[in-house]
C-alpha cells in the first residue's frame, strides 16, 4: 500500500478549488446556472500589537458551489491514487 502524504493532498485540494472556480467564472454569464456560480467571501483578519512586534494578516477565501464540487472531486481522485 502506498503512503500518501499531506503535501500531495493539499496540492489536489488547491487544484480542485481552482478548477471549480475557473469553471464557475466561465459559466457566470449563464443566468440559469447562477446558483452554481454565486460566490461567498470568507474573511479572517487576525492582528496584534505586542509592543515590540505587531502584525496584521488578512486571509480571504472565495467559495462557490462549483469550487466545492472541484474540492470533492480532488479528494476522490486523491483517494484513488
Image (cartoon, rainbow, N blue to C red):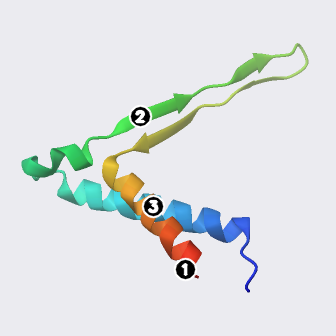
For the C terminus, give its image quadrant. bottom right
Q: Residues within 10 Å of mark 3 (few under 14, many from 20)?
A: some
Q: Which residue is mark 3?
A: 72
> Which residue is drawn at the image coordinates 36% and 60% (left, top)?
20
Marks 2 and 3, how far apart at CA: 19 Å
Q: Position of residue 41 (x, y in %)?
A: 41, 34
Looking at the image, tell me whether mark 3 or mark 1 is earlier in sequence order.
Answer: 3
Residue with the most extreme front position: 1
Q: Which residue is mark 1?
A: 80
For the N terminus, give its image quadrant. bottom right
Query: Disc number at residue 38?
Result: none
Up-down: is 6 above or below 59? below
Q: Secondary structure at mark 1?
A: helix
Q: Give the left or right position of residue 54, taking residue 79 as reference.
A: right
Residue with the most extreme bottom position: 1
Q: Secondary structure at mark 2?
A: strand
> Which residue is drawn at the image coordinates 15% and 51% (left, top)?
33
> Which residue is drawn at the image coordinates 65% and 71% (left, top)?
8
Looking at the image, tell me whether mark 1 or mark 2 is earlier in sequence order.
Answer: 2
Q: Which residue is mark 2?
A: 41
Q: Residues within 10 Å of mark 2 (few under 14, many from 20)?
A: few
Up-down: is 21 above or below 44? below
Residue with the most extreme right position: 52
Amino acid at each position: 500500500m502506498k503512503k500518501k502524504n499531506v503535501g500531495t493532498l493539499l496540492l489536489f485540494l488547491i487544484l480542485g478549488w481552482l478548477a471549480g472556480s475557473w469553471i464557475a467564472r466561465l459559466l457566470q454569464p449563464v443566468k440559469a446556472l447562477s446558483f452554481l456560480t454565486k460566490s461567498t467571501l470568507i474573511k479572517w483578519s487576525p492582528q496584534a500589537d505586542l509592543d515590540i512586534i505587531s502584525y496584521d494578516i488578512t486571509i480571504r477565501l472565495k467559495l462557490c458551489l462549483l469550487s466545492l464540487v472541484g474540492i470533492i472531486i480532488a479528494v476522490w481522485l486523491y483517494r484513488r491514487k
